[in-house]
Each structure stands twice: as structure tokens, then as C-alpha cells.
Amino acid sequence: MQITKLLGSDQVAVGTLASSKKRVLERLSELLARGADNLNATDIFDCLLARERLGSTGLGHGIAIPHARMKGNQHTLAALICLDQGIDFDAVDEQPVDIFCALLVPEESTQIHVQLLARLAEMFRDPELCAYLREAKDPNVLLETLREWERNFAPSNVATK
């Protein structure tokens, strides 16, 4: 499955200001809740925060992929935030993070979860793509940038149920 199939402009925020890890996770939870039929932002936040307490999802190079499997969640959901200014997110390289892609999958979707995380990690290893994402000032432009990357540079799609 293409990552952009999980993202709509309602789940993307660009030019966002945030002062802390907690605030970014709250905002990501709000965006994820927009795509969920039966989940609320508070429960999603609690789930993402619990996962983050196990270890930071900050990959380095300004990228973090907060993620969790959640009981009661029926669909794979994603949200993307690009901050104007990076924040401390306990990334492995100890550098500020400004691009956050959150992933929330059903509790039983272990394989899909792992596959999508690998896909995201691969996508965000592309420094040119990350530079374009950082320059995007509109959610639709950002989504089109991701779609173009998936069309032109992504390996075969991850299968999901």
C-alpha cells in the first residue's frame, strides 16, 4: 500500500509550530482522529505516548515516525506534520526533529505495521524528498510531492489487508 493512500489533506499539517514532544503528539493524534470512525484524539495520544515511552521514534536527520498498534482501531491511519522549526524529540542523533509521520494500525496488524514502518524509513532516507517536504507550504503540495516520490522512486508497494 502506498503511504499516500493513507494520507489526505485533512491528515497533513505544514508550517506548524510546536514547542514540545507532547504538543506534536497531541497534534498528530488530532490529525489521526480525523481519519478514524470510532477513535478519539485523547485515546490515540495515550497510545502514541505509551509507545514513545518505550523508546524514541526519532530516526535522526530531522525525522520521527511515532507509531503504535491500537486496540479498537479498525483501519491503518497516518498523519504527517512538517514543523517550521525542529524540536527536541530524543532522536538517535540528538538533533531537532521537524518532520513527523505518525502511523496507527489495528492491534492485530503486526506484519502490516512492520512493513509500513520499513517503507516510511526508506522514504525518509531520501534527502532530496525530505528537502522538498521541508519547503512545502501547502498540504496538497506536500501530498503531491509524496505521490511523485512513490510513483518514481518507491520499490514495489507494501501489501496490506
Image (spheres, rainbow, N blue to C red):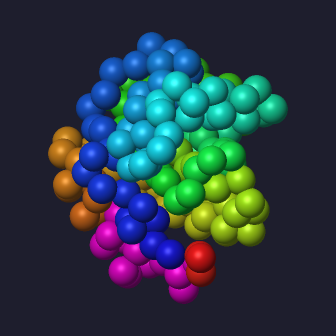
Q: Residue at x 73, y 35 (%)?
A: 51
Magenta stretch: give its range. 146-158
Can the viewer see residue 125 in this picture? no
Pick the quarter of the image with the C terminus. Answer: bottom right
Give left or right: position of 58 versus 50. Answer: left
Q: Determine if the magenta segment contains residue 150.
A: yes
Query: Percent from the top left, x then y, of residue 89?
Result: 61, 26
- Say above or below: 135 vs 44: below
Query: Percent from the top left, x then y, of residue 80?
Result: 41, 45
Give left or right: position of 3 versus 58. Answer: left
**Residue furthest right as drawn:** 54
Q: Determine if the magenta segment contains residue 16.
A: no
Q: Quadrant of residue 91?
A: top right
Foreground pick, 39 / 99: 39
- Say above or below: 73 vs 118: above
- Say above or below: 148 vs 39: below
Q: Residue at x 63, y 27 (%)?
A: 46
Can the viewer see residue 138 in this picture? yes
Q: Residue at x 36, y 80 (%)?
A: 151
**Residue furthest top as drawn:** 19
Q: Residue at x 38, y 65 (%)?
A: 4
Query: Percent from the top left, x then y, of residue 109?
Result: 70, 63
